[in-house]
Image (cartoon, rainbow, N blue to C red):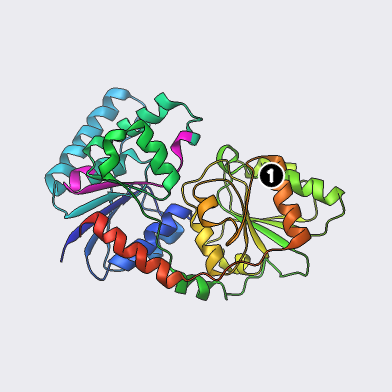
Amino acid sequence: MKKILFAAYSLDVGGIETALITLLKNLAKEYDITLVLERNQGLFLSEVPKNVKIITYKASNNKIILFRKIANFIKQFLFKIKYKNKFDFAGCFATYSFPASFVSRVASKNACLWVHNDYMNFYENNVMAYRKFFRDLKIFDFKKIIFVSDLDKKVFGMQFPEFKDKSYVCNNLIDYDRILKLADEEVNDFEKKELPTFINIGRHDEKQKKLSRIIGATIKLNKEGYKFRVVFVGKGTATSKYKEMAKNIDNIEFLGSKKNPYPYLKNSDAFIMSSEFEGYPVVFVESQILGKPIITTDVSDSKKDIDGKYGLVIEKSDKGVYNGMKKFLDEGYKSEKFDPEKYNRQILNKLKNIMDI
């Protein structure tokens, strides 16, 4: 049985973590898997297959530079002694985690980096910062790089053309049976109403998610007499700011972070995303599985995969979000039928070929 390793930051609720858990479940029966976490925590820990070994590798953050360097040198030395090239494949699943990058590069000569986000937008189109980020991750020590969207691969290829033959696009797997089952669970803090309901599920971070656009559009639509409600599932650094913006607005609800967001999505009428940039949102596929129309800003591969088939792609602006919500309220939207089994089968076959396992 081949030995593979995945390295990540933690298993808190999020799109990357959801994708990782689904990947582990699909591979655990065929391979001997080790999962390395920078922080051994998160609601998804209980979802890890029992036969997956979990170890922790956390870099020192000592404020005294000399002590930090010595501690990290020792940690790295010990990890190399125990795990250097002991795996047939190693994947750094959390792009932003430098310890995860180190672990995966050491663990196997067949090491792969996943890129889950549009880092050029994250660095506000600062090419030097973008290039430095990937160089600091030691990308030249990875055998292959997997992007979850065509857009991210193209952006990367413009800055690192030498990776043309080592870069691949492969969407994340989705646990559709689990989603359908969990969507039927009862919840006591959300009630389906006759009013059209928009739902946003995700981290509250204004730089990327721009939920202020949804709040602003809601205020404007309320003034125009539209009757609907908006539900936010998630939390983050901007939650307090968003709650203050939505103060005294009766048709906006904040429900906090949920391990199981699917009953909320199932009992809403449309998923809405207002982001400035994304990798490839797992929630796109989750919405498709539950037959919910998607209203999203023009991020990732949404023009190719969503527009005209599973929802509306709108301009990345306050006006764009307002127009998208208004169009849905005026006209509604009927999505095409989605085949999750075919979707997963194609991805898993492609992924195994890329990983060469």
Along the horizontal axis of the image, is 134 left or right of 87? right
Q: Residue, x 26% and y 44% (percent of image)?
A: 166
Residue stretch rendered in magenta on the structure: 105-120
Q: Residue, x 30% and y 59% (percent of image)?
A: 351
Along the horizontal axis of the image, is 105 left or right of 157? left
Q: Residue, x 45% and y 70% (percent of image)?
A: 340
Q: Is residue 155 above or below residue 55?
A: above
Amino acid type indicated by mark 1: Gly
- Does residue 303 belong to the magenta stretch? no
Q: Which is more toward the observer, 281 or 190?
A: 281
Could you say where residue 8 lies in the image, as x and y percent from the top left? 34, 49
Residue 248 in sight: no
Neighbor class of circle 1 (other Cα within 10 Å; few <14, some 14-19, many 20+) is many
Q: On the image, numbered disc 1 is attached to which residue?
A: 320
Quadrant housing the N terminus: bottom left
* Residue 319: quadrant of the picture: top right
Along the horizontal axis of the image, is 219 left or right of 56? right
Q: Residue, x 46% and y 59% (percent of image)?
A: 43
Quadrant housing the C terminus: bottom left
Classify mark 1: helix, strand or loop: helix
Residue 91 in sight: yes
Could you say where residue 172 lies in the image, as x and y percent from the top left? 40, 58
Could you say where residue 320 lies in the image, as x and y percent from the top left? 69, 44
Q: Which is more toward the observer, 185 or 316?
A: 316
Could you say where residue 157 lies in the image, as x and y percent from the top left? 35, 37
